Amino acid sequence: MRETDNNLPEVANPPADTPRPGTQRFHRGPLGRVLQRFLSQHRPQQEYSLVHLEQLWLQAAELDPAIGLNLFAQFSPGDWHVLLHLAQFSASVEQALQHWQRYARLASDMEQVSLQRDGERLIIELDIDAPDALMRFLTEHYSVMAVSMLHLGAGSAFQLLGAEFRHARPAYHGQYARWFGKVQFGAAHTRLYLDAACLALPMRQHHPVLVELLRDSLDRRLARLQQFNGWAAKVADLVRGELQHGRAPSLEVAAEALHQSPRTLRRRLQEQSLGFREVLDAVRAELEQSLELQGFARSQIAEQLGYADSAAYLHARKRWQADGA
């Protein structure tokens, strides 16, 4: 019996060249919702898909060309991804940055963070894997978000030495100084430079118990993301994409996207001692934790995970827990 909701919303008029879900990368936080809220304040008669971040950014940029620098000001604490709360509860700037580096993948498939020591400087390198039109917006947004959260947590003692950005200098480049000080554009990498002495600055809302609880939960989510390889990983990526697009995952859909027959794909999963249902359950359990941490109600989680109602979702949830999913 299918547990999926036949009335889930579909993406309206996707572009002809939109890649299959398995090749897409996703942002798991509230970014699309905040962009939609910003747009609705200026264009209340229009509707915006939360799926196509690039379209949202481009429309927002028509209203504010520097929206990449300014959007984080639209975020309330209720919009923060759990990683931002973890940063505030961390013991020091160094620990907050280490948490960002470790768990960035849980917030977005497009973002990679690495920390490098260079003498008396710490280099925070940010690699955004996104189309050119989207990369600048996301680079600006993530960079401002990081600086804002560290200023909030550590106070005015936290200061950047400067920054380099891969993208070309935008017309509004003068606004960068507020956040990053001395800036270079068209660089080989996107990097924020920090005096290593700042690493020891304490975060004023440090809460060791909450850090332990959040890290335990995030480590479980990270393990779920990393548990699959080979064909199971490909199927998990497709399932994740179908659910996040409001579509019902199935073995048949996954097989078609992977250019396999359903029978062949089932056999390939069996070779890894897995079935399609097990992969689907694991992905749902992973997404459930993400949605719970963002404060979604059970009915909303049930809908986003593809269940017809909360009862079906809660029944399946017991199965995940029993199986150790």
Image (cartoon, grey):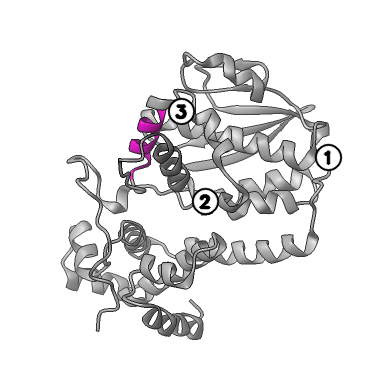
Q: Is residue 231 above or below residue 274?
A: above
- Residue 8 visible in image: yes
Q: Position of residue 197 (x, y in %)?
A: 83, 32
Q: Residue at x 25, y 79 (%)?
A: 2
Tell which circle, 3 or 1, labels the residue nearer the N-terminal end: 3
- What's the amino acid at mark 1? Leu
Measure the alpha-carbon separation of dots 2 and 1: 25 Å
Measure the alpha-carbon separation of dots 3 and 1: 30 Å
Asked if residue 92 lies left or right of residue 133, the reply is right
Magenta residues span 52-61
Q: Give the class, few, some or many, for how many residues have Cα within 10 Å of label 2's Cα (few <14, many ≥20).
A: some
Q: Residue at x 72, y 49 (%)?
A: 88
Q: Are marks 3 and 2 in contact (CB under 8 Å)?
A: no
Is residue 260 or residue 146 the one in the foreground?
A: 146
Residue linked to disc 2: 107
Q: Position of residue 119 (x, y in %)?
A: 77, 27
* Quadrant of image for the N terminus: bottom left
Q: Residue at x 30, y 78 (%)?
A: 3
Q: Give the class, few, some or many, for how many residues have Cα within 10 Å of label 1's Cα (few <14, many ≥20).
A: some
Say the numbered circle drawn on residue 201. Answer: 1
- What's the amino acid at mark 3? Arg
Q: Residue at x 49, y 17 (%)?
A: 186
Q: Are marks 3 and 1 in contact (CB under 8 Å)?
A: no
Is residue 122 or residue 302 the one in the foreground?
A: 302
Q: Is residue 136 above or below residue 183?
A: below
Tell which circle, 2 or 1, labels the residue nearer the N-terminal end: 2
